[in-house]
Amino acid sequence: MIQNILSNIDLIPILQIMWIDLILSGDNAIVIALACRGLPEHQKKIGMIFGVATAIILRIFFASIITLILDMPYIRTIGGILLLWIAIKLILPEKESVQPKHGEAKTLWKVILTIAIADAAMSLDNVLAVAAAAHGSVILIIFGILFSIPLLFIGSAFLLRVFSKLPILIWFGGALLGWIAGHLLFTDIGTQGLFPFVSKDNILQASIACAMIVIACSYFISKFRQKGSD
């Protein structure tokens, strides 16, 4: 019986989904790690759990309505713009303010909201890719979502430690989110209809440009903050 079940399973889409999850779950893990780095030590794990849970819930939600939103114009553009703003926000260091005790809960919820918005922008891409590889199979889509859970936990925990030891990598993480934002913007059918230069042929240039925009904006805002505090 087990041999019959195994013989009916097509391994190619399963391997494709596993590869998609390995690549795309890293983006969400970067967001979770960047957002949680400024939390007090005892709240980092809570932030990670909520961040991963949010990503999974959003993926389940998108998977349930994938056929409705697949070709909707401007969805990717909205996600790309949100992701640009979040990438810049995540690179910038937290403002030093009155934050102990009374501010901790507020900061935690702020981090969770930031993760949720970024996950909403990026989880759509993950679900679209998994749905395409699954060829409409609900079982394979569910497998793709379940497989991404440990990847998000392990990835975000690992990156959180890396960012605390090598802060320079935070800038690379933000640039990567900018790169993804460029891809979202230039694959939107609605935006492509409005602007002739927005096309799939220019995705590489758009991704590089958006990554550079994130770095430049973060740099100038941080410099402006430093001058303001002097």
Image (cartoon, grey):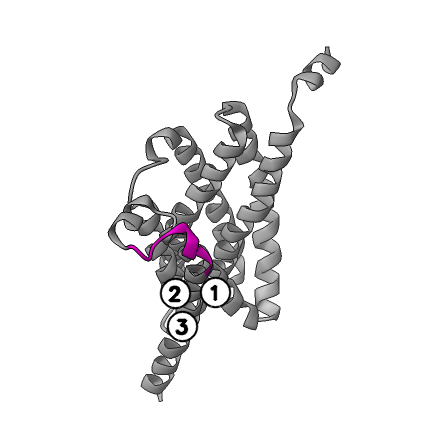
Query: How far apart are the alpha carbons under marks 2 and 3?
Result: 8 Å
Q: Which residue is mark 3?
A: 218
Callout 1 crowding tier (Cα within 10 Å): few <14, some 14–19, many ≥20: many
The residue tagged 2 is 89
Marks 2, 3: nearer the viewer: 3
Query: Decide: marks 2, 1 in contact (CB < 8 A)?
Result: no
Q: How many marks?
A: 3
C-beta proximity under 8 Å, tags 2 and 3: no
Circle nearer the viewer, 2 or 1: 1
Q: Quick one: SS at disc 3? A: helix
* Position of residue 122 measured from the top left corner of the image (x, y, whole percent): 43, 48
Residue 144, quarter of picture = top right
Crowd band around label 2 with a 10 angstrom C-alpha radius: few (<14), some (14–19), many (20+): some
**Residue 95 in view in this figure:** no
Task: Give the side of residue 71 with respect to residue 205, left or right.
Answer: left
Question: In the rendered view of the protein, which quadrant contains the C terminus?
Answer: bottom left
Mark 2 or 3 closer to N-term?
2
Nearer to the camera, 190 or 91: 190
Q: Residue furthest top?
A: 1
Magenta-colored span:
196-204
Give me the disc on residue 175.
Answer: 1
Q: Amino acid at mark 3?
A: Ser
Q: Position of residue 51 (x, y in %)?
A: 47, 48
Q: Is residue 34 above or below residue 223?
A: above
Q: Is residue 198 magenta?
A: yes
Q: Is any part of residue 228 visible from this angle?
A: yes
Looking at the image, residue 106 sits to the left or right of residue 165; the answer is left
Three-letter code for the amino acid on which mark 1 is drawn: Ala
Q: Nearer the viewer, residue 200 or 222?
A: 200
